Image (tube, rainbow, N blue to C red):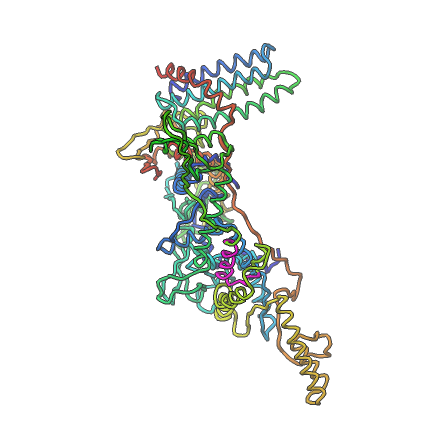
Amino acid sequence: MTDTAQQYHDLSKSVRRFDLTDRGGGVVRLNIWGMGPLVPQALPPDLPPSVAERDRWLRMTPHVEGLWSSALNIAITKTAALAWDIDSDQPRISQRMQELLLHADGGRGWVYFLSRHLRAYCCNTRGAVVEIARQTRVYGSRLAGIHHLPTSRCVPTGDPDIPILYHALDGREYELKWWQVIHFVDMPDDEEREANICAASRAYPHILKLAAIERYVLEKVSGSRPLEVHIVNGISPSQIDDAFATAKEDQIRQGHVNFMGVVLMTSVQADAEVSGYRIPLAELPDGFNRKEEFDIALLAYADALGLDPQDVQPLTGQQLGAGAQSQVLEQKAKGRGLLAWRQDFVHQINELVMPESCRFYFSEKDIRDDKLRAEADKTRIEAVGAMIEQQMINPQQGLQLLVDAEIAPEEFLAQDQTAMTTIGDDDKPESEADATDVEITPGGESEDMGVETKATADLLDAEIAAAYALAHEVLG
Amino acid sequence: MTPRPLRGLIAKLLVLILRRTGQLERGGLTVLAWRDELAQGLARYHQAAYLAGQGGGTLSEPARQVVARLVQAQLDFLDNFALQLQSAAEWQKRYNARAALYAGSIKVPYWIGRTRMLPLPFMPAQGTQCGNNCGCAWRVEQLEGEGNYDCYWERGKTDSCQTCVARERGNPYRIREGMLR
Amino acid sequence: MPLKVLIPKQLAADPRRMARAIENALTGAARAAKADFETTTATWEHQPAFDIQVSAPGERVIGTDDRIYSYLDQGTRPHDIAPRKPGGLLRFSASGFRPKTRPGYIGSNKGATGSSGPVFTRRVRHPGITARGFATAIQKKWQRELPVTFQRAIDSEVAS
């Protein structure tokens, strides 16, 4: 590990140090990972009014609805992979700022930090919180790093001097002053009641609908719960209850035997008429078109996330919506979601993190933008050529202009006349930079090993009578 | 001290296991037959231990599932053991001792029955300094209302280990509406 | 590290009961870990207080703020000891001292203060305390036992 990397691995200046074990004594932390079973099978139709509860459900949405999860992933990776630059006329300072950002989140790296941050931004009405760790708690103290703080443990106070209270894992609250934290919120509530609207909130009705559709199809295919009842003969109410209970028991006992989610009822009354009546318990509406519903949902997801619909197009394999609709949505998306975040992020980083002499900005590298850039370059070259022809400038000055505009390489010049220094995130000023990989650490999953084998079940049944006799004997 | 009903069951199961294993050693049983006999014994005694732990009564469906899972785990070990015996060149004395260990496996269903399948934090001998010599036991008092119990860790000997003493200091272990406090 | 527990399908589909099983398992393991911490100070004169905190759903933190316990648990570097009062003297036994605890062992013994005659000095270089690693040992033990406790909590939910 280089000295630089080691420096940023030190969390001693971050509030996150209170999440570690340093309580001044022996500390044990026990946890159960693999919360798979805790992921709800169904989202609530209405989100609860409490912000904390609401955010808890919104954070679960990527686990519940696969297409939303994929759309979110596209949005996050697209943004986290954006190139960025730091303009400065002081190379050493811009280099230090570059290192600070590249080693964000305790050295885990820029992409990892931004991925977590963006996911929190999209899936919490409370938004995302970035800690600006400094050497001391004093305003203006030297920067030590930036960290993503879990939104579930950050409580906005409404106090501009102490905007966030952080609930550390040691059980205590820590105040974060305005120069120690940046709070990003999507569609902030104008009444300051924390009724902000994040991307997951906006997309929630579609997430709910699509999750229900998929669950219906899954249950229909797997036969895991009765979806309709066929009444063959006359029936009593208690028989209905027993039939469902029996159906479930039967299915569990038989393991993976499917009966297509249909309960067949027969009457005990020998002289009852055959009715052949069908009661649907859950079914899709008439004229339902699954593909159409997916497309509608994906467009809504793109809208909610501030994505170009063409970005989520690979999820369906075809052009989404009519051409005009796509364009309209793209225009709409520019005012919300991650495009709005980008503006806010650049502004806040420049205000609170970058020193006066530095300016941070994202530089998009997109084929469409490359084309636009090439067109702009062509126009600039033609303009410079015209100025040289009209002897407004000499060829050397023309070349200088093209180098400043990054059209011609610096090496073409004998000596650069201009002082601006720009350092990009993929520059390597002194030594080989380590690759920054996104590390996804999946949680463990509890395994449902299922019930005992049939042979064991039969064995137990065969021995139960003898077991009762034994127990009776030893109990006296 | 191990409760008397449990002692009785362990002793009977141990006799069965040692008899059958002795027969196998002398060539009076095939490995497959020995395995089946032990499997039957484990199924019988696991269920009996649970019933004895809960003081009689019947085996409910949830209890049956728990016991079945415990039996399945023992049968998996047993199958593995049988494979080793099958491929062993000659009998070794340690096979007898290893077979005898299966008798102790019925302690678990006994204590689950005895503690009414409550979500107690630990069981006797689990993580204690005294290990398998642990003579402590749970005493469960049912209170009014559903899912309400006060549970007491009771030391069986005057010279219990430090772990059991510390656990006793945590009395009572309160369960309210099914939640351990 | 993934846990291996058996969860019946009907319980897996009920988040409320699953959450209760998880909380019961964690509370149980936390109480067991707390009891183990108390065994490490059972023979001490000075008794640190251990507590259990619910740091987040699905997590428990068990420990103490006691500084002296942390010196034993995490160890100390070699350091100089001087008398509290200026001009005073330090007094201690030259040999025969036996500590009450040892590294990696969850428990404590009687120990011994030392039988040889007292030594007086103005300053001494203490070699440092070997870390006992109580927290590490207890963490390992109960994280390993957690599946058993969790299974018990699951079975309890099934039976209720």
The reply to whether the magenta stretch includes residue B158 is no
Spot occupied by residue A355 in the image (x, y as percentages of width and height): 52, 71
Foreground: C26 or A23? C26
Foreground: C124 or A299? A299
| In the image: residue A244, left or right of residue A453 | left
The C terminus of chain B lies in quadrant: top left
Spot occupied by residue A434 in the image (x, y as percentages of width and height): 63, 58
| Stretch in magenta | A293-310
Q: Main secondary structure of the magenta part?
A: helix
Q: Which picture quadrant has residue A78?
A: bottom right
Spot occupied by residue B176 in the image (x, y as percentages of width and height): 31, 38
Tally of marks: 0
| In the image: residue C99, left or right of residue B88 | left
Foreground: C157 or B90? C157
The reply to whether the magenta stretch includes residue A299 is yes
> Which residue: 52% across, 14% down?
B18
Q: Is residue A86 above or below residue B124?
A: below
Furthest-left residue in this view:
B144
Q: Is residue A332 above or below residue A36?
A: below
> Which residue: 69% across, 84% down?
A397
The N terminus of chain B lies in quadrant: top left
Residue C37 shows in this picture: no
| In the image: residue A343, left or right of residue A422 | left
Spot occupied by residue A123 in the image (x, y as percentages of width and height): 46, 56
Residue B28 shows in this picture: yes
Q: Which picture quadrant has residue A6?
A: bottom right
